[in-house]
Image (cartoon, helix red, strand yellow):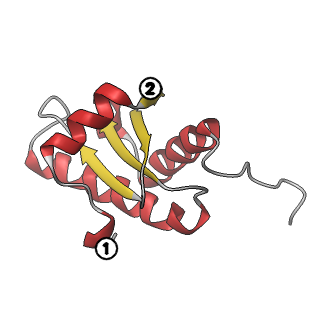
Amino acid sequence: MQRAFRLTNRASFTYIRRNGKALVCPILVIGFVKAYNIKVGISVSKKIGNSVVRSLVKRRIREAFRLLLPELKGTFNYVVTAREPIAGCDYHTIDRALRKLLTGAGHLDAPDCSRQ
């Protein structure tokens, strides 16, 4: 994901957590708030594992979100928070969970099952 799409300011994270809406699944929590452009912040706590595991999780979330950027409807700022079970998940599981949450929020169209 390009740096232009990254949310880095602590105040922005706090604002989204307090004033935004949140959706939850067993491995991810995604908070979002309406904005002028799309930005994504990723939060992985030390409960997840050591620095190697946390970096791996962040890279997987960042890549999954990068591939979804062109499909997103509307402009929102997002904060994706990893939960403890994510340490044992592969990329495809994280991607499915992220797609499910964004579809549930109405920011992503549901997959069309009629296409082959």
In the image, residue 15 above or below residue 58: above
Return the disc, 2 or 1, that comes first in the chain's sequence: 1
Task: Report x, y in % for residue 58.
Answer: 26, 52
Using residue 24 as the reference point, say whether residue 1 is left or right of it: left
Q: Quadrant of the C terminus?
A: bottom right
Q: Which disc, if any, is residue 26?
A: 2
Which residue appears at 74% of the width and 53% of the height?
A: 111
Query: Would you call the spot at circle 1 few (<14 residues within 10 Å), some (14-19), or many (20 or more)?
Result: few
**Residue 27 found in image quarter:** top left
- Residue type beneath disc 1: Gln
Which residue appears at 13% of the width and 43% of the height?
A: 10
Using residue 110 as the reference point, say whether residue 41 is left or right of it: left
In the image, residue 51 above or below residue 67: above
Q: Quadrant of the N terminus?
A: bottom left
Q: Which disc, if any, is residue 19?
A: none
Q: Is residue 82 visible?
A: no
Task: Report x, y in % for residue 48.
Answer: 20, 34
Using residue 27 as the reference point, say whether residue 102 is left or right of it: right
Residue nearest the viewer, comparing 102 with 97: 102
Query: Would you call the spot at circle 2 few (<14 residues within 10 Å), some (14-19), or many (20 or more)?
Result: few
Q: Which residue is mark 1?
A: 2
- Residue type beneath disc 2: Pro
